[in-house]
Image (spheres, rainbow, N blue to C red):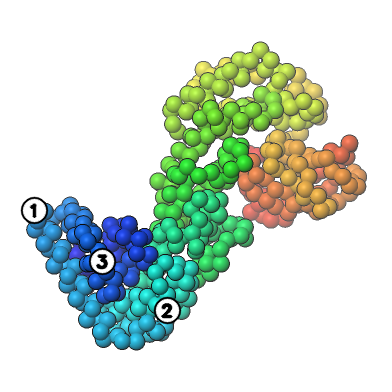
């Protein structure tokens, strides 16, 4: 904040500084920075609150001192004069608006348009008066009232005022719990942030009534303060100790990767480099032995274990964590039982070949040192030699499905075993399926490499002991392009 006039001292930048500097007081008083700035009664309360007022003045003076060269005592004096002038300005405008507490959207717009300089101040005084009768800490009521007003106002200054006030509510811990989700319910909080950033799947996944209303109200409008608040909340969520999925580290890994994929598709979040770095650090935490050992232990066969380790190696940047992963990869590759333990027991030949190709591709595209990639190729050449010659050959490569990948067909959720650009292998399927039969299905992919769902037309090719092999076609052109890019990368 760098102000030179009382009007600037209650302007947007100054109120943002007030929100950050006086955050402990605002939490205790259970009010927003908008109310503290524009309500004379709140001015008197903070002036009578002991040393807090002087403490905050000093903090603001120090912040301003980064741009000014005069001594600290002079900066404090100037800041006091500015704040005193702002308080007298607000008190004068409040006296001229005796019925401000009953102001509606049209009244706020009218006040904002009444004067180029003083109009936004008058609108702020009226908004603070509207919120005051609700009582301190009535966060849901305050949030809902601000949301109703935001949906109805039109003047840019009024929109900006409500944008900033709602952003203050969202970043206040107690208010966030009532409006979006409690901060310790990380899954719900992240879902709300994603919905506010434009993710329609998260919106359909179940969010608070306020979140749904804010998404609808914000559509097509420029609300920068709310946007920055969403990014700030999400950054706080991913850097905290709470789990995205408390069931086990494997689900935590999947949830973190899903979050990263969603963020990459949302411009508001994808533009924030801090958020990307924080997600990378969160993934790095999962390489600690207490987390990584259960993740690896859950996977059957060396091949699937290698896919997890290689995927984590690609996900993170921390050099120490990468060295630990490389050591684990080395121990698996150099295992004397590499060939016999590589596959999941009972795998069909096609599944073995698909898993071998998938691991080989992951090694080739990895950032492992050249000598380790070469060592893997030497071991793999011997271990996989019999796969190339045996069995039928296909133009389209197959990829082993993840443990959460499913095909929904005939009302059943059936595990997907492997898939290609043109075919699916799924089962066990408890139903009638014969070669030549046509069926409709929904394919749900939720693995470490791809997260998507699509509708498909199936033509059954073979059915044996509950395992169904089928050709598939997808009508959606965008989905077809994604599948093609995935297999031909």
- Report crowding for label 3: few under 14, some 14 to 19, many 20 or more residues within 10 A (C-alpha): some
Q: Nearer the viewer, residue 471 or 193?
A: 193
Q: Are marks 1 and 2 in contact (CB under 8 Å)?
A: no
- Report crowding for label 1: few under 14, some 14 to 19, many 20 or more residues within 10 A (C-alpha): few
Q: What secondary structure is found at the residue carrying circle 1?
A: loop
Residue ID for mark 2: 153
Q: Are marks 3 and 2 in contact (CB under 8 Å)?
A: no
Disc with the residue nearer the chain's start (3 vs 2): 3
Residue ID for mark 3: 46
Q: Quadrant location of residue 103? A: bottom left
Spot occupied by residue 173 in the image (x, y as percentages of width and height):
43, 57
Disc with the residue nearer the chain's start (1 vs 2): 1
Which residue is at 67% across, 45% downward?
A: 445
Which residue is at 55% across, 45% downward?
A: 244
- Report crowding for label 2: few under 14, some 14 to 19, many 20 or more residues within 10 A (C-alpha): some
Q: What secondary structure is found at the residue carrying circle 3?
A: helix
Location of the N terminus (image quadrant): bottom left
What distance separates the C-alpha of mark 3 from that of mark 2?
31 Å
Residue ID for mark 1: 71
Q: Is residue 350 above or below residue 189?
A: above
What distance separates the C-alpha of mark 1 from that of mark 2?
44 Å
Which residue is at 13% across, 55% downward?
A: 68
Q: Nearer the viewer, residue 126 or 174?
A: 174
> Is residue 73 shown to the viewer in this render?
yes
């Amino acid at each position: 904040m760098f102000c030179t006039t009382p009007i600037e001292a209650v302007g947007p930048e100054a109120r943002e500084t007030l929100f950050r500097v006086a955050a402990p007081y605002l939490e205790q008083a259970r009010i927003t920075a908008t109310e503290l700035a524009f309500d004379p009664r709140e001015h008197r309360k903070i002036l009578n609150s002991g040393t807090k007022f002087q403490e905050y003045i000093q903090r603001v003076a120090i912040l301003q001192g980064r741009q000014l060269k005069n001594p600290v005592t002079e900066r404090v004096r100037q800041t006091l004069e500015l704040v005193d002038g702002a308080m007298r300005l607000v008190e004068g405008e409040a006296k001229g608006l005796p019925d401000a507490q009953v102001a509606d959207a049209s009244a706020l717009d009218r006040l904002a348009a009444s004067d180029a300089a003083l109009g936004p101040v008058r609108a702020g005084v009226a908004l603070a008066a509207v919120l005051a009768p609700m009582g301190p800490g009535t966060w849901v009521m305050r949030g809902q009232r601000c949301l109703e007003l935001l949906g109805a106002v039109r003047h840019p200054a009024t929109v900006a005022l409500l944008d900033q006030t709602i952003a203050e509510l969202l970043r206040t811990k107690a208010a966030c719990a009532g409006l979006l989700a409690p901060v310790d319910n990380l899954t719900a909080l992240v879902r709300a942030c994603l919905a506010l950033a434009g993710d329609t799947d998260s919106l359909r996944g179940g969010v608070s009534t306020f979140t749904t209303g804010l998404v609808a109200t914000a559509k097509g409008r420029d609300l920068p303060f709310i946007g920055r608040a969403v990014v700030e909340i999400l950054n706080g969520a991913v850097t905290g100790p709470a789990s995205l999925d408390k069931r086990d580290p494997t689900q935590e890994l999947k949830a973190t990767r899903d979050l990263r994929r969603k963020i990459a598709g949302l411009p508001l979040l994808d533009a924030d480099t801090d958020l990307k770095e924080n997600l990378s650090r969160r993934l790095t935490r999962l390489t600690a032995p207490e987390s990584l050992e259960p993740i690896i232990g859950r996977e059957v066969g060396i091949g699937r274990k290698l896919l997890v380790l290689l995927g984590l190696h690609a996900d993170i940047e921390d050099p120490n964590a990468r060295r630990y992963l490389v050591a684990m990869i080395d121990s698996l590759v150099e295992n004397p039982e590499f060939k016999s333990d590589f596959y999941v027991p009972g795998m069909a030949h096609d599944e073995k070949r698909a898993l071998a190709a998938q691991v080989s591709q992951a090694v080739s595209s990895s950032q492992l040192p050249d000598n380790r990639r070469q060592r893997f190729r030497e071991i793999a050449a011997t271990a996989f030699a019999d796969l190339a010659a045996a069995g039928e050959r296909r133009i389209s490569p197959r990829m082993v499905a993840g443990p959460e990948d499913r095909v929904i067909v005939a009302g059943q959720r059936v595990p997907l075993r492997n898939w290609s650009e043109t075919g699916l292998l799924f089962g066990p399927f408890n139903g009638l399926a014969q070669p030549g039969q046509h069926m409709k299905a929904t394919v749900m992919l939720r693995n470490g490499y791809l997260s998507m769902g699509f509708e498909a037309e199936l033509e059954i090719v073979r059915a044996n002991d509950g395992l169904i092999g089928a050709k598939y076609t997808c009508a959606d052109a965008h989905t077809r392009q994604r599948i093609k890019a995935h297999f031909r990368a």
